[in-house]
Amino acid sequence: MEDIARRVLELVGPGVEAEVLVGHTALALTRFANSFIHQNVADATTSVRLRLHADGRTSSGSTTVTNDEGLAGLVSRTREAARLLPPDSGWPGLTPPAPIEGEGNWDEATAQASPDARADRVRAFVDAAGGLETAGYCRTLYVAGAFANTAGQSVSGRTAEVAMDGIARANGADGLARLSSRRLSDVDGAVLGARAAAKARASTDAVELPPGRYEVVLESSAVADILQNFALYGFNGKSYNERLAFAEPGAEQFDRAITLVDDTLGESGLGLPFDAEGTPKRRVAFVSAGVTEQVAHDRRTAAEAGAASTGHAIAGGGSFGPMPASMLLEPGPAAGAAVEPGAVVDPAAAPLVASVERGLLVTDLWYTRVLDPKSLVVTGLTRNGVWLIENGEITTPVRNFRFTQSYPQALAPGAVLGVGPSVTTVPDGWGPAWRTAPALRLASWNFTGGASG
Amino acid sequence: MTHFDVATAAVQAALDAGARYADARVMHRRYEAMSAKNGEIEDLSQSEDAGIGVRALVGRGWGFYAVPDLSDAAARAAGSRAAKTAAASARVPGPTTDLTPVGAGAGSWASLCEVDPLTVPLSDKGDLLVHATKTMREHGADVAEGLYQIWDTEKWFVSSEGHRIDQHIRECGAGISSSVIGDGEVQRRSYPAYRGQYGTRGWELVQELDLGAHAARTAEEARALLTAPLCPAGETTLILGGEQMALQIHESVGHAIELDRILGWEAAFAGTSWLDLDQLGSLHYGSELMNITIDPTIPGALGSFGFDDEGTPAARRDAVREGRWVGVLAGRDSASVAGLDYAGSVRADGWARLPMVRMTNVGLEPGPHTLEEMIAATDDGIFMETNRSWSIDDKRLNFQFGTEVAYEIKNGRQGRMLRNPTYTGIGPIFWRSMDMLSSESIAWGTPNCGKGQPGQIGHTGHPSAPARFQNVRVGVRG
């Protein structure tokens, strides 16, 4: 890949600022439904992305055709596009040479996982569900990348992930288990299948409760949705520059229990050790003890804001803006005496459930969409298990709710009643990103509708 | 080697490796998108990708493998890998898989295109967006954005049953939007829809939109929204504009009638469907005004094609007739499981993704009224238009949608503007309350329909017209 990057820069020629990102992605996903494998896919793709700045004009292009003809075509099209476009007054320049820390999170067994290895995990998940209908996937992914630019920055790295996400179904009630890791050996289909089945069995005969504001314990899968919306909208440097984001650096916008970082290189991080502009990845704190510290920047949004890139440029993200892909909500202090979680509560949420007088335990949030980006009011539904908590005990399964809730307001000063002592890493439902979160106990969540309307 | 030769080699390799059925798609796709903000070009993306995806059926298990290499050796290796992957599926086997017969043969198809959008000079396309966003900015937009997108896709399909089909599909579209920032909230107006209007047409589609002529209005309306009263909360008579109706059809009918969802194949992610196949032909989905068709033959609509990605020729079919549910979106394997004799709604997002059940053009046949007549016939209600947010449950029943703008209706007249409009409901209850339907139909294009794992983006079309609904809950907010 380094060779491809070098060849492209040679084709661009002198007198032009240029950067090349070459990525090779091998993705394999074994999907099951009705307790059998119904889709089993894999692909291996190398793509080349070129961005150049010539005569004050900027353009970019990409291709998967990596032979000489394909690369020459990429350079020709991109140079021609730059010639025809208006001047780019906001060009931030190329990333200067800077070292990266390590090659990225890597596990050979994960990267080389076979179709049989994935199918074995599915088999174990299905068997552990004890006859309940199951559905989900087991995914392995590895990404290798090389970046080079005409300013002298040249870096490469690789990363691997395994993820399993599945439900068990009992009489129309679903139970969830979801986990991702860099190590194939961390994902045990039997453990996940048993957890999903226990939740499903405990969800049957759910009752409908009236909508309204409830105290809640959100398990990590539900908290991950909050992190995802923060990543997309709240801490997006482009939205921030346009005054469309809620983030106000320096302001105490969150409860003191909230510390939120992005940490690609950490234990729970996924991705290459540099971004699409070649900026080295580092741990970035967005919120420290409730105080908003900064937002995510690429070189362009950083220049506009008078800041430095935080290493969050995404390929082709010019119109969307920079985005963190390894968000981590720091866990709370360790609990005292161990709390028996019971059948339906994730062990990470058990200490929080035990302290709730009356509230709801929420496993997962679904189909969340932003009603207003500035206040980050989001509507969506609960999914995969809701239970009533009374006097610290799970008492009754509850039918799903629709909610309409400002996410930052839910985590505002005084609103966070507890942060779980351990975190779980879950895969993004759509792309290669991870969210790592503890369970959260929140004073209020605005449920605006029941399952029947 | 021709692309047909490459695909044939891949299919043969899969058969040699034990497949009892195999197909292969060679695809070459070019994509171009430009965005502008506040009178300046913000981003230009130009990409090209080419590769082959091979699907193999071994015993009762499917396998799929894709590579961006169109050499004979790579194609054969992909066919072999697809069969090997299918064999691994046998570790967790399902019921016997058959394919509903659809006939095999050769074919060739190309979409309508008067002006090849990739040959229009970038400078002309840039000028269009710069002018429109500059105008919006001058008329009060804090953030004025414009976007166009172009896809040019050629594909060659071969199957072990004898299919040999090539298609050339060109799609494009554009849109503009004005955002204004108020005290703790953002208001937006877009034209003709938030992400624009799209179709299987050439640049003439974008020219007909005449973005510049609507730029000032979007900015002025967005600014007016900042001081407009909130949409009241309660139950009322609701009239939806045609573009919002397209979203309503997409989310609460289109996805619900996908056969893979009905069969539980999407249960863990996209979800299932509230529909039960035992009720196909008898279920009362909506009012008698509700006639929904599945029609990939509509010229220029975004979900149009000559053949789907299993080689099934495009054909029109009823999904809902006079309010009764009568048809589904199906593929060959799902149709076989369901005991149906038709397929034709399977497509893939590029060569590297598995073909799956997708909407084509799922639309509402026009009714007898006009929007003006519907407003005149409403004593007390709300008119909402231009989608802003959408959320629906995993069974496609419980929805909550928001639009950019609403207007009060009093005594048959459209009144003051309302901000932050939302409405919520349960699919069949909502559709059964439709009592007026306009004849002013437009085939709206949705270029961002997500489904599947790995995720795929689908392009769908939705002919729709303004309609009126009774006793709808509106004004839900956080």
Image (cartoon, coloured by chain):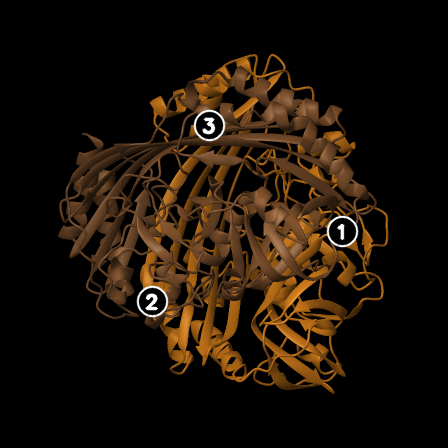
Chain colours: A orange, B brown
Asked if marks 3 and 1 fall on the same chain, the answer is no
Under mark 1, the amino acid is Ser
Task: Look at the numbered discs 1 and 2 and tell me whether their residues touch, using CB distance below 8 Å.
Answer: no
Question: In the rendered image, is residue B231 in sight?
Answer: yes
- Spatial CA distance of label 3 from label 1 is 36 Å
Q: Residue at x 51, y 35 (%)?
A: B197
Under mark 3, the amino acid is Leu
Q: Tell me, for residue B205, which label it has, or none.
A: 3
Mark 3 belongs to chain: B
Relative to A408, residue B459 above or below:
above
Residue B380, image x and y in percent?
69, 55
Q: Residue at x 26, y 66 (%)?
A: B337
Secondary-structure class at tag 1:
loop
Asked if marks 2 and 3 fall on the same chain, the answer is yes
Q: Residue at x 20, y 51 (%)?
A: B22
Label 2 sits on residue = B280
